[in-house]
Amino acid sequence: MVNTMVNIMPSKPPVIFLQEQRLLRALGERIRLARLTLRFHWVAQF
């Protein structure tokens, strides 16, 4: 079982190109800000 997991899961993360990495970081930041905004609006209602 463990041997199969080692074969399936690579030892290092896949190479992400610089532009993709920037896009993913920007997307993560937008999601974080959206969550904060939603939380703020939800709290401000009460």
Image: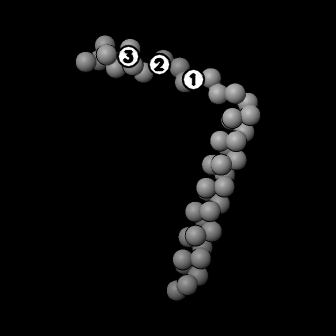
Identify residue type, mark 3: Val
- Which residue is located at x 74 percent, y 34 percent? 19
According to the picture, the residue beneath numbered tag 1 turns out to be 14
Q: Position of residue 10 (x, y in %)?
A: 47, 19
Q: Earlier in the sequence, mark 3 or mark 1?
A: 3
Q: Local crowd at mark 1 within 10 Å, few (<14), some, or many (≥20)?
A: few
The residue drawn where x is 34% and y is 20% is 5
Rendered view: 15 above or below 28? above
8 left or right of 15 in image: left
Give the vertical position of 37 relative to 30 (above or below): below
Whole-number angstrom distance, CA of label 3 to CA of label 2 = 7 Å
- Residue furthest to the bottom in view is 46
Q: Is mark 1 on a helix, strand or loop?
A: loop
Q: What is the crowding at mark 2: few (fewer than 14 residues within 10 Å), some, or many (at least 20)?
A: few
Residue under label 2:
10
**Residue 11 on image: x %, y %:** 48, 17
Answer with the quarter of the image where residue 42 lies: bottom right
Tags 3 and 1 in contact by the CB under 8 Å rule? Answer: no
Which residue is disc 3 drawn over?
6
Give the CA separation, mark 1 to mark 2: 8 Å
Secondary structure found at label 2: loop
Task: Give the percent coordinates (x, y) of residue 27.
Answer: 65, 48
Identity, as a three-letter code, of the amino acid under mark 2? Pro
Residue 45, quarter of picture:
bottom right
Q: How far apart are marks 3 and 1 (CA)?
A: 15 Å
